[in-house]
Each structure stands twice: as structure tokens, then as C-alpha cells.
Image (cartoon, helix red, strand yellow):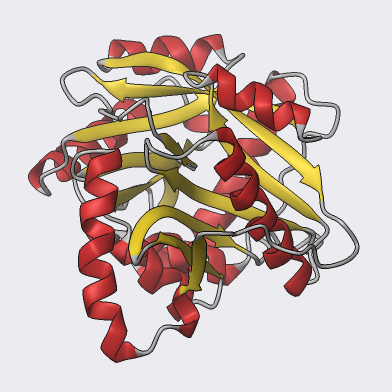
């Protein structure tokens, strides 16, 4: 993929995802065009691992990939509905997978609509295996800033850290991420949200030690989307943290949303941690949507289930 392909990619994404939603029975199936900046961010994340297929000088398929250290995933990806069934989907997925392997990926995964039997069969034939549901939950935030019960905790916003202090903090952050999931590294994501002005990140500290991390997008993805959500792309808490500590994290996110004039939180949680999911529901979070997470055979996700490790693979 080249940067100049993004206009055609955007048109195909809207066309293919609209068709897919209609097949899945959505009441409102139309998927609007993405913001130009959003696709540019996705392309910049791992440009050498993004691919297109052209036929008769027309773009008929595309695939983006993301690489967080050695943790990687595919998406979004599409094939023109008029060209389905001719092997283009398989071809582009295999190209993306081979690129990620060459880049040193140890985890290779993707997410798809949990009710899409056709896509489930397609990816299973390519060697992907189901790993459980990821569930999107949302919560309205208060109309006023809430007093933080941080007690022994401190929070540090990445955008407020001076360049001189970022280097040692990032060294500690990489150690923290690797404790949560081997090979995990969000350094590039921090660069992207800052360079594209799409959001920010927050480190939760205890006695000058990182015990939590939150990465969020605060801008819209589509041209028609209203700016409403703070979208949590990653939330990690070390194993020593409790449900009460998670409440502190929620308060941090609510105040963050308030400062950005956003009215709701959008968070993706893993069904592997039902106790945390139940706790969020008790805190007025509502279920919005769910997807199925799959990983390539031999490239599964290793995560410490005693800690919290929520992330969006899309």
C-alpha cells in the first residue's frame, strides 16, 4: 500500500463494510467514509505491512496491520464485494501474515463480527483459531469533574511529560508492558496519537513505579461521526491492583473525558476476565457490541490473566 492509495481504500472500506453489515442484519448498515487523518494514522502505524490488490488499474482489496512490539494484528481489511470468491482475500491475508512474521511478530491476530459464520470459516481455513469474545461497553460520564480518590497513586499524562523525562519513563513502561504481555510495546502508538493529535496516554504511578497504563483516542474516525466518546484503545493494570483500583482508573478516564468535552467512555474488555466485566456492569457500563478475537496457530496471545490487559484490535 502507498499513501496515495488511501482515497480508494476509503471508498472500498465504506462499500465493503456496508455490504457486510447488511448481510449481518444491521438495521443501519451504511458505513460512512473515514476521516482522511484516521486512515493516514493507520497507514503510518506499520506502512510496510499494509497491502492492496489491484485489478485492471482498480483497487479491489486492502489490508492494514498493526505491530505493538512483537504483538501484531490485522485490520481493517476488505475485498470488493463484486470480486469475492476468487481468492483475493486469502492472497492479501497471507501477504500480511508473512510480513508480520518477517517483522518478528510472536502474536498475530484479528477480530471479526462474532455472528459472521462465513468470516469465521474463512479465517479458520487460513490457520486462525478463536480465542474468545471481546466486548464493547460504554458509560455516560458525569457533567462535572469528579474528585479523584488516587490516595497513594499519581497520574502522568504523556503529553505533559518533558522530552528529557520521556526516555526513562518509556524504559520503565516497556518493562511494565512486557510483564502484562510478553513482547508488548506501545511506544509507536504514543508517537502516533501525538503526531496525529488523535488522543493521549496516561500512566498510573505508585511510589514512582508504573502500575497502570491507559491509551485513548479522543477524535472521531468517520466524516459523519459526532465527537462523543473517549475511546480506550488500551488499558493495563498490574496484577497487584484490585477492583477498587480499577474504580480509580475509571475516575481518571471520566475526568479525562470531561476535560475533552466528551460525554461517554468506550472500552473494549475481554470475556476471559468475567469478574472485571461484571464489575464494570455494576458501575453503570452498558454492553454495546461484541466481536470474536482470533489468533494464528502458533502465534497466540500470551497474557497474564491476573492482571488487566484490555486492547482494541481494529
Residue 89 lies, in percent from the top left, at: 37, 29
Q: Position of residue 63 (x, y in %)?
A: 38, 45
- Tell me if residue 84 comes above or below residue 187 in the rendering: above
| Lateral position of residue 200 relative to residue 237, left or right | right
Left or right of 298 in this view: 271: right
Q: In terms of depth relative to the viewer, which is nearer, 240 or 49?
A: 240
Quadrant position of the N terminus in the picture: bottom left
Q: Quadrant of residue 185?
A: bottom left
Name of the residue lying farthest toward the right: 143
Front residue of 219 and 284: 284
Total labels: the figure holds: 0
Which quarter of the figure has residue 145?
bottom right
Which percent across, then down, holds residue 243? 58, 34
Measured from the top left, where is residue 11 in percent x and y? Answer: 59, 54
Along the viewing direction, whichever of 66 and 207 lies nearer the viewer = 207
Name the residue: 41% across, 83% down.
161
- Between residues 277 and 88, which one lies in front from this camera angle? 277
User: What residue lies at 27% left-to-right and 17% top-to-bottom?
Assistant: 126
Residue 260 seen: no
**In the image, is residue 233 above or below residue 307?**
below
Quarter where residue 26 is shown:
top right
Q: Residue 157: in sight, yes or no?
A: yes
- The residue positioned 33% from the left and 47% from the top of the image is 65
Amino acid at each position: 500500500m502507498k499513501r496515495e492509495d488511501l482515497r480508494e481504500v476509503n471508498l472500498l472500506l465504506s462499500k465493503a463494510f456496508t455490504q457486510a453489515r447488511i448481510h449481518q442484519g444491521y438495521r443501519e448498515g451504511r458505513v460512512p467514509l473515514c476521516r482522511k487523518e484516521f486512515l493516514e494514522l493507520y497507514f503510518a502505524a506499520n506502512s510496510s505491512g499494509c497491502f492492496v490488490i489491484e485489478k485492471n488499474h482498480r483497487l479491489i482489496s486492502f489490508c492494514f496491520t498493526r505491530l505493538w512490539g512483537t504483538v501484531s494484528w490485522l485490520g481493517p481489511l476488505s475485498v470488493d464485494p463484486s470480486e469475492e470468491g476468487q481468492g483475493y482475500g486469502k492472497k492479501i491475508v497471507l501477504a500480511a501474515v508473512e510480513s508480520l512474521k518477517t517483522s518478528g511478530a510472536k502474536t498475530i491476530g484479528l477480530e471479526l463480527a462474532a455472528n459472521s459464520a462465513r468470516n469465521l470459516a474463512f479465517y479458520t481455513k487460513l490457520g486462525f483459531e478463536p480465542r474468545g469474545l471481546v466486548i464493547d461497553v460504554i458509560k455516560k460520564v458525569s457533567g462535572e469533574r469528579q474528585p479523584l480518590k488516587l490516595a497513594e497513586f499519581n497520574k502522568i499524562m504523556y503529553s505533559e511529560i518533558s522530552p528529557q523525562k520521556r526516555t526513562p519513563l518509556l524504559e520503565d513502561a516497556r518493562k511494565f508492558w512486557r510483564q502484562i504481555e510478553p513482547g508488548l510495546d506501545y511506544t509507536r502508538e504514543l508517537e502516533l496519537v501525538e503526531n496525529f493529535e488523535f488522543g493521549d496516554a496516561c500512566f498510573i504511578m505508585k511510589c514512582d513505579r508504573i502500575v497502570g497504563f491507559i491509551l485513548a483516542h479522543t477524535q472521531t474516525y468517520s466524516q459523519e461521526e459526532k465527537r462523543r466518546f473517549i475511546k480506550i484503545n488500551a488499558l493495563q493494570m498490574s496484577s497487584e491492583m484490585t477492583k477498587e483500583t480499577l474504580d480509580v482508573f475509571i475516575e481518571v478516564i471520566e475526568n479525562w473525558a470531561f476535560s475533552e468535552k466528551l460525554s461517554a467512555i468506550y472500552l473494549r474488555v475481554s470475556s476471559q476476565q468475567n469478574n472485571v466485566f461484571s464489575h464494570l456492569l455494576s458501575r453503570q457500563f452498558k454492553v454495546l457490541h461484541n466481536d470474536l478475537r482470533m489468533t494464528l496457530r502458533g502465534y497466540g496471545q500470551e497474557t497474564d490473566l491476573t492482571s488487566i490487559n484490555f486492547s482494541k484490535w481494529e
